Image (tube, rainbow, N blue to C red):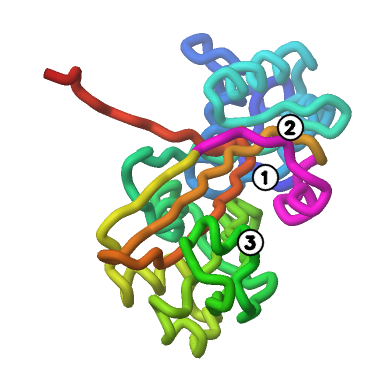
Amino acid sequence: MTMATTSYGNNGGTATLATSLHQRIQEELEHKIIAGNWLPGHRIPSERELTAYYGCSRMTVNKAMTRLANAGLIERKRKTGSFVKRPHSQAAVLEIHDLKAEVSALGMSYDYRIIDRAARPANPSDRQHLELDSDSPVLEVNGLHLAADQPFCHERRVINLAAVPQAAEESFADTSPGSWLVNHVPWTEAEHRIRAVPASAEMAHQLQIPRGTACLVVERRTWRTDHTVTHVTLTYPGSVHQLVARFAPSA
């Protein structure tokens, strides 16, 4: 277990009357989380380990851990231990956010990985979402957005190649399809549909969550003048993302 060099309690004897030992334990663990020494998902030493390290009672450690959990800094899981909690991401309902910027705003490193990419004729679902004819070509790209090397959002995107023919030559190895489209094809209109769904076996595997976990799904279509450009489905683990709308009463 890697901790600070100073000990407190019966072994170190440095706890003061002004600050109780459980407060000192809480502050030291909190500092490691806020300073980024322990990243989201990091397993915190067990209560037994902390009790031995600080030379105090299990109740003292439990009180510190309970306060960290109530502050939203850690997540306590039965039988598996306590972990640094991932920050809660939020996005405005009527805006199109860049996922890289969204993750960076949470203070975490960002990465994007392609799962698969294929150009193909539009299927019935594509024709409905993108308002296409039966023989129209599309590009489907499935990928995973990562925050601190952990799955943050699964993206399934279908691009209308009649509206964006240059996308057919793009590998998306260095940038996500969403970021690429924003830089190459300015949109003039967008539509959001939002729903909650249980994670399928495949989605649970991609997001590394239990099957059936509640997920937040944001479906988006964008247009450029009279052409539908893309249809994207963004799937987030429901516990780490929320949508926010701020508005005024109508006249």
Which of the numbered marks, if any, corresponds to residue 187? Answer: none
Judging depth in this view, the residue of 46 and 180 nearest the camera is 180
Q: Secondary structure at mark 1?
A: loop
| Residue 36 falls inside the magenta stretch | no
For the residues marked 1 and 3, what is the alpha-carbon distance in whole angstroms?
40 Å
On screen, 24 above or below 229? above
Region rendered in magenta: 194-210
Q: Earlier in the sequence, mark 1 or mark 2?
A: 1
Crowd rating for badge 1 (residues with CA inside 10 Å; few <14, some 14–19, many 20+): some
Q: Are marks 1 and 3 in contact (CB under 8 Å)?
A: no
Judging depth in this view, the residue of 126 and 145 nearest the camera is 126
Q: Position of residue 151 (x, y in %)?
A: 65, 54
Q: Earlier in the sequence, mark 2 or mark 3?
A: 2
Residue drawn at the location 55% of the way across and 51% of the way down: 234
Residue mark closest to the camera, 1 vs 3: 3
Q: Position of residue 143 (x, y in %)?
A: 62, 66
Q: Is residue 82 visible?
A: yes
Q: Pointer 3: what residue? A: 124
Residue type at the position of mark 2? Ser
Residue drawn at the location 32% of the way across and 77% of the way down: 184
On screen, 33 above or below 65? below
Total marks in image: 3
Residue drawn at the location 81% of the way across and 29% of the way down: 52
Which of the numbered marks, if any, corresponds to residue 82? Answer: 2
Q: Position of residue 121 (x, y in %)?
A: 62, 77
Q: Earlier in the sequence, mark 1 or mark 3?
A: 1
Q: Secondary structure at mark 2?
A: strand
Residue type at the position of mark 1? Gly
| Residue 201 falls inside the magenta stretch | yes
Q: Secondary structure at mark 3?
A: helix
Which of the numbered marks, if any, corresponds to residue 41? Answer: 1
Report whether 112 appears left or right of 164.
right
